[in-house]
């Protein structure tokens, strides 16, 4: 049993890398430490504890994780340093070797940090506490508020899809989720805290239901009935799990925004097969056309990876042309990074770095054009914007239900309020469309 009195008057600093799910989980860790008597460090102070929540989706993410660890140690030389997250689950011994690291926690342990803190004395070498991936079973609820107005609600964790390029199932474990009843309670708590917008997050959120034998569509229906939430957004969802029923529901719902985000990853069926994805381009096109038929103003963001093993010039051209043909709003382009232990390493053809860079630029150019056209098509329409807290004195920003960024003169009375406005011209300096009242 830990004597929590040792935590009184102690402070903690938090460093988070990667996805919105990580940010939600860091928030849960912070809440746990706060309940034990540990407060968040104030700006300019040295922390007694540092928690670094890492990502490992790419080689660059690993590098950024190491940089964040060293930065935390440099800024807080006497702090007890805890490293967790996906990089910690996959490479715990490498992290433990970094001078100044005291504790490395795996995916099963990270949301029970207090249990492993002991007396906060610095160690000669980092201690590693992890579980084998196949033993990761727990689902710990997490909800966080960003520094603006939206909340991120974790509804699912883990993944049973073993795509050839991805390490996430090895870092996060198998698919699992919270119950609908518990998640609704968390949404109601967000209302109590004054939150207006919730983003549903997870690793593979459309796979919701493994733990509780419930379904994702039933979760959406129950959340839609929570009074006080103005809007929900569904974060990235696999195209094969974005059912027509879900699209129809969003079109008719009271609170779910016409905003979709799907990973395409490649617009070539041959490459999708090499990636071991669970859909083809025909299914993906159907989803886009279904959305645009019943929700013509919907924002559709799409993830794409360039330069994967096996992506020949012909396959890339096929992918590029397919993407050009889609009525989407924006691309998120990622450059393939080889990850140890993945099946993709068995594919012979490798793409050189120069070609990867050129392919990335080509898709980003397509993305810029599609995003500009989408925003231009919204000019003159009336939309509901949720203005965010701002650090600027002259203007404030917010997003419409279909994710158009708007700006207006700063007025604190409009912060965290949903207001109907007309979408005006795009302003390069503001990088947003003007809100006309």
Image: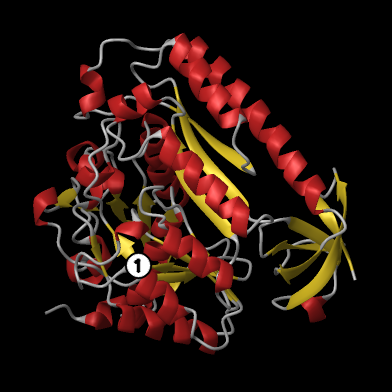
Residue at 44% across / 29% down in the picture?
266
**Up-down: is 82 above or below 239?**
below
Q: Quadrant of the C terminus?
A: bottom right
Residue highlighted by disc 1: 216
Q: Residues within 10 Å of mark 1 (few under 14, many from 20)?
A: some
The kind of secondary structure element at disc 1 is helix
Question: Can you give x and y, in whole percent of width and height, for residue 277 in the image?
Answer: 31, 36
Residue 404 shows in the view: yes
Q: In front: 282, or 137?
A: 282
Q: Where is residue 2, by image quadrant?
A: bottom left
Residue 337 shows in the view: no
Q: Where is residue 137, by image quadrant?
A: bottom left
In the image: residue 66, left or right of residue 175: right
Q: In front: 155, or 27?
A: 155
Q: In front: 210, or 26?
A: 210
Residue at 21% across / 49% down in the picture?
160
In the image: residue 370, left or right of residue 286: right
Question: Can you give x and y, in whole percent of width and height, for residue 72 in the image?
Answer: 43, 49
**Up-down: is 293 above or below 98?**
below
Question: Can you give x and y, in whole percent of width and height, for residue 244 in the image?
Answer: 44, 58
Q: Quadrant of the N terminus?
A: bottom left
Question: Can you give x and y, in whole percent of width and height, for residue 330 in the image?
Answer: 62, 41
Q: Where is residue 291, by image quadrant?
A: bottom right
């Amino acid at each position: 049993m830990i004597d929590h009195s040792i935590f009184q008057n102690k402070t903690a600093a938090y460093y988070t890398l990667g996805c919105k799910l990580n940010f939600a989980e860091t928030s849960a860790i912070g809440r746990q430490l706060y309940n034990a008597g540990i407060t968040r460090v104030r700006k300019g102070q040295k922390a007694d504890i540092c928690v670094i929540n890492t990502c490992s989706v790419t080689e660059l993410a690993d590098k950024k994780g190491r940089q964040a660890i060293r930065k935390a140690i440099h800024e807080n030389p006497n702090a007890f340093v805890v490293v967790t997250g996906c990089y910690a689950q996959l490479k715990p011994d490498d992290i433990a070797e970094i001078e100044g690291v005291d504790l490395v926690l795996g995916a099963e342990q990270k949301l029970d940090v207090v249990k492993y803190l002991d007396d906060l004395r610095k160690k000669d070498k980092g201690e590693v506490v992890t579980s084998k991936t196949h033993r990761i079973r727990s689902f710990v609820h997490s909800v966080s508020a960003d520094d603006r107005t939206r909340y991120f609600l974790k509804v699912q964790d883990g993944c049973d899809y073993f795509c050839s390029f991805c390490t996430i199932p090895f870092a996060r474990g198998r698919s699992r989720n919270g119950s609908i009843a518990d998640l609704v309670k968390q949404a109601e708590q967000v209302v109590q805290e004054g939150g207006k917008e919730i983003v549903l997050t997870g690793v593979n959120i459309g796979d919701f239901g493994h733990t509780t034998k419930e379904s994702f569509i039933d979760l959406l229906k129950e959340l839609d009935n929570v009074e006080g939430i103005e809007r929900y957004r569904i974060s990235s969802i696999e195209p094969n799990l974005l059912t027509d029923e879900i699209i129809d529901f969003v079109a008719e719902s009271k609170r779910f925004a016409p905003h979709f985000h799907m990973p395409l990853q490649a617009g070539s069926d041959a490459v999708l097969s090499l990636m071991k994805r669970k859909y083809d381009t025909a299914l993906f096109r159907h989803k886009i056309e279904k959305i645009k038929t019943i929700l013509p103003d919907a924002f559709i963001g799409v993830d794409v990876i360039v330069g994967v093993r096996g992506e020949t010039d012909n396959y890339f051209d096929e992918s590029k042309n397919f993407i050009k043909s889609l009525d989407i709003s924006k691309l998120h382009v990622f450059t393939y990074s080889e990850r140890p232990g993945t099946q993709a390493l068995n594919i012979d053809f490798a793409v050189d770095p120069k070609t990867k860079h050129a392919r990335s630029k080509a898709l980003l150019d397509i993305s810029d054009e599609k995003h500009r056209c989408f925003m231009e098509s919204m000019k003159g329409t009336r939309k509901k914007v949720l203005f965010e807290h701002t650090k600027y004195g002259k203007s404030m920003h917010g997003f419409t239900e279909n994710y158009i960024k708007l700006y207006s003169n700063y007025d604190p009375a409009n912060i965290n309020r949903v207001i109907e406005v007309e979408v005006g011209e795009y302003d390069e300096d503001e990088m947003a469309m003007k809100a006309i009242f």
